[in-house]
Image: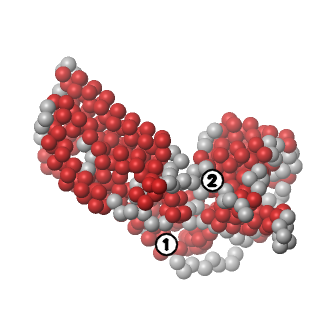
Amino acid sequence: MTTSYRIVDEPRPGALATLAVDPLWPLLAIMFGGAWLSWPWFALNAFAIGSPTRRREAAVAVGGFVGTTVLLVALLWLNRVDVLRGVGLTYAAVGLVVWKLAVSYWLYVLQGRTFALFQHFHGATRNGLLVVFAGYFLGHRLLAALGEIDSFGWVLRLVLR
Amino acid sequence: MSLIGDDPPRTTERRLHLARRQMDVGQLDGAVESLRGVLAEDPEHAEAHAWLALVLHDQKRLHAAAYEAQAALVFEPLGVLPLMASATVLMSQRRLKEAEERLEQLRRIAPEHPEPPRVLARLRALQGRLGESKELLDEALRLAPEEVDVLTDLADWHLDRGDVADAERYLRLALEIEPESAEGLVLMGHVLLHRGEVEAAREHAVWALRKNPSSRRALHLLAAVKARGNPWLGLWWRYSVWMGALGDGRAILVLLVAYVVYRFAVITADHLGYGGMASAVSLAWLAVVAYTWFGPALFYRSLRKELAGVELEEF
């Protein structure tokens, strides 16, 4: 009796495997819900499918929030010292969206490779449509409420959006 | 040795042979499973690790391929196949200096083997050193005048320089030896296209794609064939093949750059008071986004249509 040989990039799903979804759903979540839903979902999914790069994926998700905060604070500071004003600030704000999209697509690509193997070996996964829907309707209200608390809440809202 | 008389070494050999056959006909998943079987029995089988590295390389699982190539080298540091697998993976990782070291080492270990100079010729071509590439291919041909891979590489070298007659001469030799050589058929398709035999070129591309649906060269050939019939359709095929060949990382970079261009265009148009133009740009962007969702599916449906119902003529 021999045990099977495992190739290094093949997934090792654990108890969370039942929560596994196609990484397309967390990617859609960045568009319809926001980073608050998408990036933690990517991190959870990395552990659910047993991705060999799960720690890296979790680190990218955390780094995404850190980077967004740094970019946002930099933009606000440049605005306060009058370097960025009016349309200049609008152009610069595109960088924030590009950063969020880049982090999300990076996670999608990283996870996509393992997910193809996960599907090959384990078959069906959950449908993430309901979560995306819930994220879209609840997320907007929660983030709007957060933005109304105080200036910190307003910054937090932009980071999580 | 098992009680039912199964002979492990023979089983291993059979599985390795099966894996190589599966690789030859493009059944890469099957080849992985055959090699997995060998390694489950004998995790220190260097040759199986090396073949697995080559299969994973063809599946574009470069990280795993590098791991397997390294494992092969650990168990057989001076083996021809482990060194070749390692060099092949290193080249795809663009670690050309290390790949070159492996290949030079191989040439010292197996001076009579045509593969090291042939692969080194590819590396030189990647470095743009085409003269040296040709010299190495000639050396490989001297070592193995009937080696199909060497003949097709030589044909490719001539075709790249627009030397169709010499390319055809090498291809005819290659296809006489191995009429089903996918590489040979694709290159012959390019030769036929040069000669204006568009339908024959299409048949060669389709036949090669049936063996290996992800063959970039065959897709390029088919795109070139399409462009002969309809420039717009040809442009779409070229774009789809180009995007497919970029790989996920670069394709995303292209889309992100496109997004920045779109946002800047909208902001500028709005700022200058051209609200109508901003709306038009937004609509165009919406169309681009919609295309990124549906375009690849349309392309592959079109490709499947092409692959149906073509029989290659004898030549």
Which label was assigned to residue B59? none
> Relative to B61, is B298 above or below?
below
* Residue A115 falls left or right of residue B26: left
SS for dot 1: helix
Which label was assigned to residue B304? 1
Image quadrant containing the N terminus of chain B? bottom right
Please name the amino acid that badge 2 sits on: Ile
Q: Does residue B271 appear in the picture of this structure?
A: no
Please name the amino acid that badge 1 sits on: Arg
Place residue B9 in its image quadrant: bottom right
Residue B65: percent from left, percent from top: 64, 50
Residue nearest the observer in this picture, B30 or B191: B30
* Residue B310 falls left or right of residue A139: right
Residue B288: percent from left, percent from top: 31, 55
SS for dot 2: loop
Q: Does residue B22 appear in the picture of this structure?
A: yes
- Residue of label 2: A7
How busy is the neighbourhood of tag 2: few (under 14 within 10 Å), some, or many (20 plus)? some
How busy is the neighbourhood of tag 1: few (under 14 within 10 Å), some, or many (20 plus)? some
Chain identity of mark 1 = B
The number of numbered badges drawn on the structure is: 2
Residue A20: percent from left, percent from top: 42, 57
> In this figure, which colouring scheme has been used for the structure?
secondary structure
> Relative to B100, is B26 above or below?
below
Residue nearest the observer in this picture, B305 or B16: B16
Q: Residue at position x 44%, y 70% from top?
A: B302
Q: Residue at position x 26%, y 37% from top?
A: A159
Q: Residue at position x 54%, y 63% from top?
A: A121
Task: Work out whether disc 2 and disc 1 sit on a shared chain.
Answer: no
Q: CA distance from mark 2 to mark 1?
A: 31 Å
